[in-house]
Image: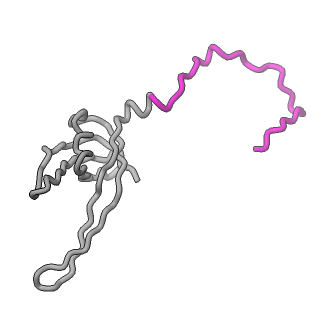
Amino acid sequence: MEVQGKIKMIGETQTFGNNGFRKREVVVTTEEQYPQHIMVEFVQDKTDLLNNYQVGQNVKVSINLRGREWVNPQGETKYFNSIQGWRIESLQEVAAGNMPPVAPAEAFQPANDLKEDDHDDLPF
């Protein structure tokens, strides 16, 4: 799954517990009729992926949805969801990398020898 939008906030890397679990959060605001502020967490070595990004930059974030079950001390079962990022790309780089250059329209000669009764063999 992917989330596209503009970076609203990038948090500092947080470290938890004795084993050094690391987490860093980024908020991406979608650009649609009703913009959504989506918080995505990057964990462990993926926290470093955010080092080269800044607030205001347009990005595409590849995500996984995670769910956990937890039983509290009173015996009640609770469920938690999180959105975990595993890749982030600048939309400018994506657009530049996937689009081949297009020649200007004047570089093409118009086709003047078309006849209505000519049939092509294209299957669509």
The region drawn magenta spans 97-124
Residue 110 coordinates in the image, percent (x, y): 73, 18
Q: Quadrant of residue 88?
A: top left
Q: With 110 as the anchor, is 99 left or right in this view?
A: left
Residue 123 lies in the magenta-colored region:
yes
Q: Is residue 45 above or below residue 53?
A: below
Residue 90 lies in the magenta-colored region:
no
Residue 84 coordinates in the image, percent (x, y): 29, 54
Quarter of the image that includes the C terminus: top right
- How many tags in the picture? 0
Return the residue found at the far front.
19
Q: With 100 as the anchor, is 83 left or right in this view?
A: left
Determine the main secondary structure of the stretch shown in magenta: loop
Residue 41 coordinates in the image, percent (x, y): 24, 52
Q: With 99 as the anchor, is 27 left or right in this view?
A: left
Of 92 and 117, nearer the camera is 92
Q: Residue at x 36, y 42 (%)?
A: 60
Q: With 114 as the anchor, is 15 left or right in this view?
A: left
Asked which colour scheme the image uses, the reply is one colour
Return the residue found at the far right.
117
